Amino acid sequence: MPPNNEAEIDAASEEAMSVDVDDCVIGPDLNTHRALKDPKIYRQFIIKKNGLRCIVISDTIAMVEERHEQGNFDEDSGYESETSSVMEDEKDAKDAGGEEDGDEDEEYQDEEAGIRKAAAAMVVNTGSFYDPLCCQGTAHYLEHMLFMGTEKFPKENEYDAFLSKNGGSDNAFTELEYTLFHFDVSQEKLWQAMDMFSQFFVSPLLRPEAMERELNAIESEFQLSKNDDGCRLQELMCHTCGKEASEHPMGKFSWGNKQSLKALPEANGVDVIGEIRKFYRQFYYASNMTLVVIGAYSLDELQEEVVKYFSDVPALPREPSSLQMVVEDEGTFERVVHSPIKLFGMPFDSLSLGQMYRIVPVRDKHSLTITWQLPPQVDWKAKPADYIAHLLGHESKGSILSALRAKAWVTSCHAGVGSGGYENASSHALFSFSVTLSEEGVEYWSEIVATVYTYIGMVRHHCQSPCGLPSYIYDELKSVQDVAYQYQDEPSPEELVELVAEASTCSYLPADRLLDGNSVLQAFDGEAIKVILDGYFKPTNSRVDLTSSTFGRETDFNSGSNDDNVTMEDTASPNDGADMVESSRQKFGEPTQEPNFGTRHWCEDIEAAVLTEWEDLCLPRAAPKSSLLDVPPLNPFIPAQLKLKPLPEDDARSHPLADESETRVEDRTHFPAIPSAAPESHLPCLVSDTNGVKLYHLQDRKFKRPIAELRLRIVCAGGNQSPFVRACSDLFVTLCKDELIELCYQASTCELGSNISIDDIGFPIRVHGFDDKLLELAKEILSVFFSFRDVEEEDKLPSSIKAGRFEACLEMLLRSYRNAGIQASRYSADVRLRSIRPTNWSCIAKAKALEGIDVASFMRTVSSMLRQLSIDALLHGNVTLADAKDTALMLQKAITSPTSSILPREKFPQETLIQLPLSFAESYTIIAPTKDATESNTAVEIYFQVSKDDLKKRVLVDLLEHVLYEPLFDQLRTKEQFGYQVSCGARWTAGIIGMSFRVVSAAKSAKEITSRIERFLLEYRDELANMPEETFTEHLVGLAKTKLQIHNSLEEETSQFWYEIAIGRRDWEVHRNEAVSLRGITMEDLLTCFDEYFYPGTEDKKNERRRITIQVIGTGEEASSGRPAIESAKIGEEVDKMVATFHKTTGGAVWK
């Protein structure tokens, strides 16, 4: 239970500090600053032998579940008594009259039964900024290599296979100043996993042959990101910072690829393997690391095991480096770390500032970014840069966004110092203000920048005035951050260890503030805000990046390409791209290309007169009224009521586990205990089913937070009946969101979120967050939604929609259509879904349908769509039955109108799914080129249909995924390097069970990939048939434990309930029921399922299967074989024809 008063905090603190300290230095207590609703117990210590900083977390949530599952613990473990003593201390504190936040602990005794994983993370304080100049990408390369075997566990996939069998997972990522490795696994396998994990940092093999293969994975990862406009802009900023890599690490190429890690080093006589090993010896040592572990064990147990497995991590570097950390008071929690990166200072040379970069994008997009360089942001108490970001980035009335939207120049904005290493480093911080532009806005980029500087001048004026900035701004920010932290959702164990590990890299945080230091405001410092604004928010300290497809897109510049894989038909642009390129060349000359990503750009000095104008605008002065600029208004959504509402007096209670006789499994003693079925009062109950409103309600008993979720789906009869109607529905949603921007932004800053979307049945709406003002926001959203139905003149927009917004939203929507499916992997998934769902209209069909649309035809379509309506809803959280009834009345009032009627349930739209034909022969294959002619990757997806939804078949397919995933990945990705993305996954589409196998590769052809997946299924049959019973049981138990994972948040539980409502199944305890079904699954069942639906069969006896293959072929040299020669402008239409032809081939057969 959470520490709600001083006595409880003292009890947790005493627990955290009680340990034999002979081999460890115990650190400051973290428990005093944990969140109000955080029941876990924390301890940090340093292993004396090597200086490794460790944070262990006793997961009291999981310990409750482990007690449920195991009954009594080993008396020698200290496990039960220690936990019990803490809980007894908390009970004694309450009995002594400690204050409580309401009566929730008397009312709420219900704990969710289920399972929670253990997890660990190791963060190493080195990253890509530390790469040797001769071998850039080394940190990333080494991160990959540590997974490829150690002296103690030499098999390359031993670690991954162990975790996979035991319901776990693992991953890692390389930042610029740190590298983080993490895993999760079932509780009882934690020590074995830690043993394997620890060897990464003791004795990795770093085999040369594995390095050669893994370099292909590095290259594939680079190729997957090469056409991402965000990555391209970031790399361009590094390349044009004005400093060489030797002068500032910002100039290094952090990604790494074959060029930087093989071709260039070899040309310069550099031993890459030697550099990798040298880097490991220089930076991978205990005092440069922090380990975080969470498990359902006492702190003493966790500490003992951590010391046991991680004491052999080398204490110090085994090789010197010019970038070595300088540490004072090493081995203590008073240590002061001096990062060598800090000495490099600001990244942008003065000559690279005051400049503008025009950038050619891959996608159809228009954006403007202003970037200022600041000193490192280490003031964790006042967070002045965050305060400035709130002012510049707010979206309500008086904001920069509001003023620019009124001119139809801008559609969205973002401001602040990013969380990534490029933006937030030891040497500097980069504060950016970014806007998404309309096409018209591109022409007015200078005026937009001027508006930003006018706003900065207004803020500086407030800072220098006697009254200063309005006090309510800080008060609101602090209030919301405080309650958001105290009532934050419980993160999953893996998320938590990552968060704490990353916080440990913030050397400016005191050792006892890792949990809350980055989350809450501690003080207001007007002077710090003034210093940053006055000293750094200047035009001469900034750069402007203007990205726009009006300059042409990357594919348009390839029309003269010498690449045999890119044809003239590929590169012909649908939007006069060649003309745009020619125009850009005439205006700006020939573009320069950044060498790694190939980003084309023009750099020019901003005219002195313009810089002078901006300098004048940002001087401290009040903004003119005509600018429409002002500081943020008072926020009406600040929560005032945070108490938990009482449960019904007759609320049912039940023991969380069934009787032992119900859960025993023959010959499978390790199968997890299964919770008993919940009483009806603990599951969603139908409280309204009249007059078109069907509302389910459940008052929360588990998460004990003052939050709620309202999920709606407004069902209409014809919202998806044709491409035109669906496109109008998309435009309708876009207009609703656009109208609600200012209101919903204010709500979002108070942790009250919302969204409107569209599906084949209707319009889902979600409102979530603190329950105090939740229904008020829902009413406002519904008011805007139904204003399109209740217009006085059918062919005119609601009066609230401002002039020009229809055209602006139409432009946004059409651009999103053009950008859809631009990545090979996403396009393959889109084509697969369209192939099996006949009313899943393509974006090209919707865009074509909107040609020539006007307000009158749009409004007639929307009005017609909204004439017959019904609502399905779920209200869940800190809400009573009375709240639910009030909500039902609100929905009833909203849906009732003289212009509309109730849609009978029997007339609800039905989702249909094509029934793939059974075939012995090769799969029906749709072959399409990538929409982007510069996309080097090829994606192949083979989709198998199994049957209509059936509990046993559903869990069998899930179990097959659990069994197949790791060997598929290991064989195709790790050993044979078919591509960076190799996966298989169960699919549940419109009530039909299936499974999909996917590979994305720039190194193999579509034919090779398709053949290799089929051969894998053929060859793996023998392994499956000969699988030892022990291995089968491990998979069965691992999947069952995954099914029985407890929900970490109200959002997770609500999403599960809402999914059951949306698909009409209403199996509230679906995962429990699937676990029950798994108990009876045998190896014979699994093999039969594999043989019937997936096994290709032998040459002599082919097997009938329902399947379709989608091949989206890119232009990479090794991946382009078989790419259809279709003109770029016609790819969408041609693929639509292929899909239509396939539909005819099936004879229109659908699942019924």
Image (tube, helix red, strand yellow):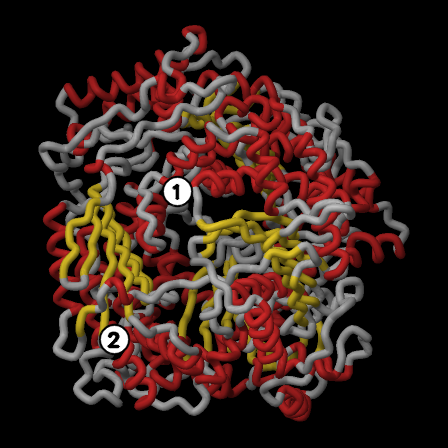
Tell me the distance, in whole angstroms, between the alpha carbons under discs 1 and 2.
49 Å
Which three-letter amino acid code belongs to the residue tagged 2? Leu
Direction from residue 39 to residue 643 in the image, left or right: left
Q: Position of residue 386 (x, y in %)?
A: 39, 57
Of 571 and 716, nearer the camera is 716
Q: Which residue is identified by label 1? A: 517
Of 958 and 936, nearer the camera is 958
The answer to whether one can see residue 238 in this image is: no
Q: Is residue 548 above or below residue 510?
A: below
- Crowding at label 1, few (<14), some or many (≥20) Cα neighbours within 10 Å? some
Residue at 40% of width from left, 12% of height from top? 73
Whichever of labels 1 and 2 marks the residue nearer the N terminus, that label is: 1
Residue at 23% of width from left, 26% of height from top? 654
Q: Which label belongs to residue 866?
A: 2
- Give the SS element for disc 2: loop
Which residue lies most toward the top here?
A: 76
The answer to whether one can see residue 928 in this image is: yes
Which three-letter amino acid code belongs to the residue tagged 1? Gly
Direction from residue 211 to residue 1026 in the image, left or right: left
Q: Position of residue 856 (x, y in %)?
A: 30, 90
Q: Position of residue 531 (x, y in %)?
A: 41, 61
- Give the SS element for disc 1: loop
